[in-house]
Amino acid sequence: MNPTLLPDLEAQLREAARRTQPRTLTEQAARRATARPRRKLLVVALAVVLVLASAAVAGVVALRSGAPAPKVTGLGLPYHGAGRVLPGERAAIAVTAPDPDGGPSWGVRSYRTSRKAACWQAARVLDGRLGVLGRDGLLGDDGLFHALTPTVDRCAPLDGAGRLYVAQLALALDNGVQDRLTCRPAGFAVDPGRPALPDCPDGSAREVFYGFLGPAARAVTATAPGRRPVRVALSRDGTGTYLYVVKLDDPLRGLPLTLTARYADGTTRDVERRPPTYVSPRLPSLATLRTPLHVTRRQLGKNTNYTVSFRAPVSVKRLGLDYHVAVDGPRRGEGRSCRHPMRFLGFGTQDDVRRGERISFTVTPGIALRYDHGWCPGTYRVRVVLQDRRHPLGGFTFRAR
């Protein structure tokens, strides 16, 4: 901010207060039963002027716009993970909520991607734009507002009806940054990966509750022991977007805070539960998924590795629908001492898959936390599945001694 603007601004505020404040204080004094000394009125007027000046200066610092915030990720790849933000996708702010300390409100927006997913952002709001504030170690503490561009940082699959249902609780700072904070809130341990992170100013940490409940959501309420229920901001655009922001150093923060949604059918449930309008995505039939598997065995030192390959029976073009390997081993099949049950689901394809495309996975003792130690004794059932164990393509069994 240009420092030469501050004296002019303060002079203008003082002049405005001089024209308006004495009249207001006189009218207030006239309504009182006892008159106050003139000197006391002047002291009160001067105090009000100084408060107004400092608040206005702070507002100018926080509310001026700077360059867009640097991107943490891009718009995404059209065939990988959440996909790419759709061209021309309207990313309007669905709902806003106040910050506990005032200033720019918080807001949430969502937007769709090429892989039948939706992504979202939650941050501060200025002039209808979503962004972050240059303070608490962010962007050189320039005190400016920096608009965010849509990215694919936080995304989830759409349901079978093409709607987004997600409940989020994020640790944030009052600058609008979530998760990878630019300073360390009071009471938090030092991050070994970021030991030089400075301490946050008192009262700057936030907990941000937000999510998407769909078109049937009618109200959301936050409740906690010893606290009156609070009506949570809820959008009316059909997405059921809700938003609630609290300070991390709130003395009641440690108590259970529950957000409950009421829906059009009269039911109420925790926001983390699926709403009554959720529609499960349709998956191919089991008969369609059945396909031959080719399995090869290879010994590398103490590791017996199994590579399974197959041709994809159906194409995959959306987030959350992947080919995986599921392994169910013995009750004592995991860890260096073989003391834990062995159960694994992983190796997701993550990218678009064409029907008939060749896919392969290699299963090693590493999935049982025993790489270079071999498999624990027992029987292992390996299956290739689409999304979960209820949709297998085929499988095989091996035994370790």
Image (spheres, rainbow, N blue to C red):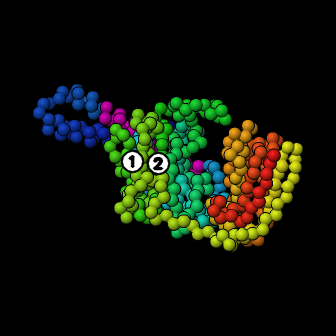
Numbered-mark total = 2
Specify whether 98 is left or right of 308.
left
Between 384 and 267, the residue placed more toward the observer is 384
The residue lying at 79 percent from left, 65 percent from top is: 293
Determine crowd level at label 1: few under 14, some 14-19, many 20+ residues with C-alpha closer than 10 A: some
Which mark is first along the chain, 2 or 1? 2
- CB atoms at circles 1 and 2 under 8 Å apart? yes
| Res 31 quadrant in image | top left
Q: Is residue 62 visible?
A: yes
Percent from the top left, x then y, of residue 202?
47, 32
| Res 157 quadrant in image | bottom right
Specify whether 35 is left or right of 358.
left
Tell me which secondary structure the magenta stretch mostly adopts. helix
Q: Amino acid at mark 1?
A: Ala
**Which element is circle 1 on?**
strand
**Which element is circle 2 on?**
strand
Find disc 2 in the rendering and name its residue: 209
Magenta residues span 47-69
Q: Is residue 79 visible?
A: no
Specify whether 162 is left or right of 231.
right
Between 2 and 229, the residue placed more toward the observer is 229
The residue lying at 63 percent from left, 49 percent from top is: 72
Percent from the top left, x then y, of residue 259?
42, 49
Find disc 1 in the rendering and name its residue: 222
| Res 387 quadrant in image | bottom right
Q: Amino acid at mark 2?
A: Phe
